Amino acid sequence: METCCATKGGTSKVAEGHTIHALAARLNTAFAGQPVRVSSPQHTFAAEAGRLNGHEMRQASAHGKNLLVAFADAPTLHVHLGMFGSFSVRAHKRAIRDGWLRTEPPASGSERLRLLTLTHLGDLRRPMQCRLLDDDGVAALLDRLGPDPLAPEQDPDAAVRVLHRSRREIGLLLVDQSVVAGIGNVYRAELLFRAGLSPWLPGSAVDLNLLRTLWSDATYLMSIGTAAGWIITDTRQVEQAAPYLDRGERVPRWPKVYAVYGRAGQPCRRCGTPIDSAAQGRQRIFWCPRCQPFVDD
Ligand SMILES: [Zn+2]
């Protein structure tokens, strides 16, 4: 199972929050509650890996696009995959002798960080950020992040009020990690289409109830994405995925169907109007000018 990102066709593939939540769950299943051998086959993180080596991994957690891995009596590992990072987690079946592996799984040398136990292997490659944080550092990081639609304890109204107070464009607000943590470029475009909202509307111009609907739709779709292992936003595909999710299975990777994302110039699936596209913030936004009219009362 691989968490991976790449750039393709001018649309960025930064890991969105659902990917990091799924990664945290895999790390917990594989390593939590056990002492972990931690190393840096690439050597660039060797000193830090040494401070974690042999400590029990307590818990991995996702905060938007940030992964935090807590160890007993050691600093916390903070990882942000960015555009090109990947963190693979898998079981291995290496032979054991004298309480440890007879031979360790081979490394390519590109692994910034490696987690290893008698049964599992985790390899982190090309992260945008990989560092150790003390408790104050963790608190400061969490302070900078907005509410995460996938955090169970989140108060939806707090997030909605922040969106509603701002004069900034709703398309910008949704991907500003200090406002909402975890939504990336694909989800913002598809969520705004589903809500019938122009990405160019100021947050303050959007009806509060519509913002609540948008927030719960984000929680709904990103939960599906976490369980499925890929972004599903098309209504029909959501329905097709339901039986797999009910059985706790991963959903087959059908060809992705987006309403607007990556579809500049193609006809809207609902009304036939060509999908529009422009830079908004550091990434491109896609929208249907007819289904998502700019109406600022
Ligand atoms: Zn349309």
Image (cartoon, rainbow, N blue to C red):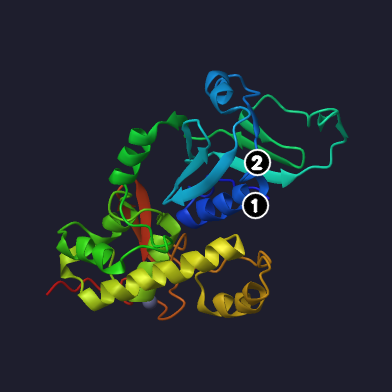
* Position in image of residue 157 (x %, y %): 26, 69
Q: Residue at x 38, y 61 (%)?
A: 188
Side of 186 where 287 appears, left or right: left
Q: Nearer the viewer, mark 1 or mark 2?
A: 2
Say which of 144 and 168 sits in front: 144
Residue 174 in view of the camera: yes
Residue at (68, 24) in percent of width and height: 109
Give the amino acid at mark 1: Thr
Q: Is residue 6 visible?
A: no
Residue 19 at x, y percent in the picture: 53, 54
Q: Position of residue 165 (x, y in %)?
A: 15, 62
Indicate whether 198 appears above or below 229.
below
* SS category of the residue bearing label 2: loop
Looking at the picture, tell me which residue is in the foreground, 49 or 83. 49
**Beta carbon of the mark 1 residue lies under 8 A of ligand 1:** no
Quadrant location of ligand 1? bottom left
Q: Secondary structure at mark 1?
A: helix
Residue 84 x/y as whole percent: 53, 39
Dot 2 corresponds to which residue?
34
Q: In the drawing, does residue 55 fall left or right of residue 175? A: right
Please name the residue that numbered disc 1 is placed on.
29
Check disc 1: other Cα within 10 Å, few if <14, some if 14-19, many if 20+. some
Q: Which of 271/261 is in front?
A: 261
**Mark 2 Cα shell of 10 Å, populated few (<14), some (14-19), many (≥20):** some
Q: Tag 2 or tag 1, which sits nearer the N-term? A: 1
